[in-house]
Image (tube, rainbow, N blue to C red):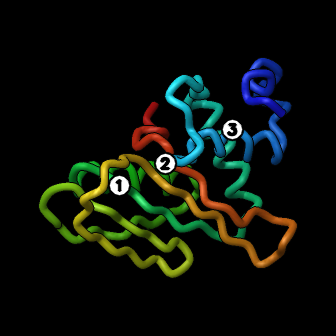
Amino acid sequence: MEFLSLMSTLNAESLTLDAAQTILRQFLCLERSPHTPMPENALVRQALQLVAARSDYQMVGICADTVAQASTALSAYLVGLGYTSVPDLTVVEGPVYVKANLKTDRCHVAPYTGTHRGVLVSCQSAEEEDVNETFGHLPLALFDC
């Protein structure tokens, strides 16, 4: 389904798994056109929560300007996805990449020289019919109200 027609027909009650994945795929770095309108954060949050619920667990990768910015985003995403614990992040100067495995509650922080900023969410499932896909770079402030 074309994204613009999808956006015009969606509301909170009608969001399906296929529609949620279509919304989240708009953020794929390699496929995004600068002229493509981005969906509202509320719809993206709902889509992410729906696909996360159809996976066994998630891994989160964050590209940010600072550890503090990455920590804020990680905390907000974890709360938004229903997790109760937030791993501590090692302090690294400058831009960072944070990888958090939410199944093992392990986190890795490394310097990052790339230009992307945002959050990657990788949904992991044992069952083929459930979601096994990575979405992003989603906005760092997606779960800010």
Mark 3 to mark 1 CA distance (whole Å)? 21 Å
Where is mark 1, residue-wise?
Answer: 63
For the residue labelled by badge 3, is the local secondary structure a helix, a strand or a loop?
helix
| CB within 8 Å, label 3 to label 2 | no
Instruction: Give the x, y percent position of residue 55.
Output: 72, 65
Task: Using the image as rendered, state which of residue 14 and residue 80 is in the foreground.
Answer: 14
Q: Residue at x 73, y 47 (%)?
A: 21
120 with respect to 9 (left or right): left
Instruction: Give the x, y percent position of residue 80.
Output: 54, 49
Where is mark 2, residue-wise?
Answer: 137
Question: Which residue type carries mark 2?
Answer: His
53 with respect to 80 (left or right): right
For the residue labelled by badge 1, is the local secondary structure a helix, a strand or a loop?
strand
Alpha-carbon neighbours of circle 1 within 10 Å: few (<14), some, or many (≥20)? Answer: many
Where is mark 3, residue-wise?
Answer: 23
Q: Residue at x 23, y 53 (%)?
A: 68
Question: Which residue type carries mark 3?
Answer: Ile
Mark before the other along the chain sequence, 2 or 1 = 1
Q: Quadrant of residue 99?
A: bottom left
Mark before the other along the chain sequence, 3 or 2 = 3
| CB within 8 Å, label 3 to label 1 | no
